[in-house]
Image (cartoon, helix red, strand yellow):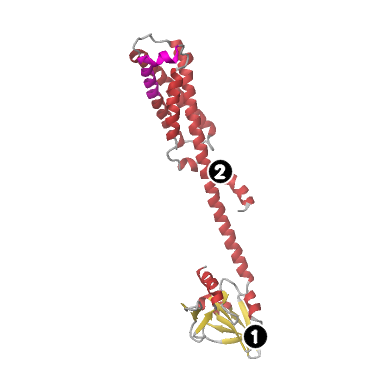
Amino acid sequence: MNKHIRLMLQPALLIEHPSEATQQAGPYPDRWIKLLCIPLWAVFFRHIAEPARLADLLMSPQYYIDILFILLAAVFLWQLNLSIVRWADQRYSWAANTTRRLLVQGGLAYGITAALIVLLSLLYHGFMQLEPHGFNASYLFLSELPVNLLFVTIIHMIYTGLWMIRYHKQSVATLNREIERLEMQALDTKEAESEDAFKQTLLVNQGRGLVPLATAQIACIFTANEASFARTLEGKAFTVDGTLEQLEEQLSPREFFRISRQFIVQRGAIRRVEGESSGRLLLHLPPGNPATVTVSRRRAQLFRQWMEA
């Protein structure tokens, strides 16, 4: 692919369609991330500033209650923040509205999470402890709240990374589609220019003079008695200067095909194609032309490809 086209298109497309990946956003591939991160976080959070030995903790029912409570809280916080991420996905693109997205998403995430952590802490100390020790505001604001906000930060970093990966893939796909479109357009232009380079009219002999004959009116060109003839769709025959090799180079390969040493046929003149057991092909031309002409077995496959092009 054309490297220069890629370099020109990339910034233009990203600026023109900054939110395309956002508009096409679907579910995040986060199943295994959640299954791994949430239990690990629950265990990690339970053991913060825990002086007791693990063996003693495993013998305590309160330990399992704590793990279960933290696990449920972590699931709730994760889903809540995922909802915030999805809400922001519909409104702000990280690529086009980075600062606004950061402020809005961060403000909602930290503000709502902080309020919920306080409520969950009150709930835990009031109802989940087998031996209540009372609510410790200093521990909440100096330990539990910062650690949970770190958890929220990790959640949003994960989804920002997933968003960037998806945005990159969709941007590359968009670029590739645009490049393919431009390449096809360039190919069509090149083919059109190359078609213009071929003759659209041949000068054929008529009496003592020459008359122009449009190539679109030619059914076939053939040799007989060491002379070249052009026969029209109406069946009129004219001698034409040049050998078949020279004429083949002057005519469009899209419209004319040399089926044998003696014949060149025009695509529009072929009425029907029949196959022979020998591998050759029989071509039926318009009235006034030879009833059938034969495509040699050696050129039959190339002829089929040319007809289907």
Residue 149 position in % (x across, y down)? 47, 22
Identified by mark 1, the residue type is Leu
Residue 122 appears in the figure: no
Residue 84 belongs to magenta span: no
- Position of residue 239 relative to residue 196, above or below, is below
- Callout 2 crowding tier (Cα within 10 Å): few <14, some 14–19, many ≥20: some
Give the distance between the C-alpha atoms of the residues marked 1 and 2, in whole angstroms: 59 Å
Residue 14, disc: 2
* Residue 125: quadrant of the picture: top left
Residue at left offset 43%, top offset 40%: 26
List x then y, in percent, for residue 228. 62, 85
Q: In front here: 185 or 261? A: 261
Where does label 1 land, which residue? Answer: 210
Could you say where residue 70 lies in the image, as x and y percent from the top left? 40, 21
Above or below, 111 relative to 94: above
Give the answer, above or below, for where 4 lies relative to 97: below
Amino acid type, mark 2: Leu
Decide whether the magenta segment is chiefly helix, strand or loop.
helix
Give the image quarter of residue 140. Answer: top left
Residue for point 41% across, 24% down: 74
Badge 1 element: strand
Q: Earlier in the sequence, mark 1 or mark 2?
A: 2
Classed neighbour count for the residue bearing mark 1: other residues with Cα under 10 Å, few (<14), some (14–19), many (≥20): some
- Magenta region, residue range: 52-73
Between 280 and 291, the one lying in front of the other is 280
Mark drawn on residue 307? none
Left or right of residue 269: residue 83 = left
**In the displayed structure, does residue 95 sit left or right of residue 47?**
right
In percent of the image, x 36 and y 16: which residue is there?
124
Residue 10 visible? The answer is yes
User: Quick check: marks 1 and 2 in contact, CB under 8 Å?
Assistant: no
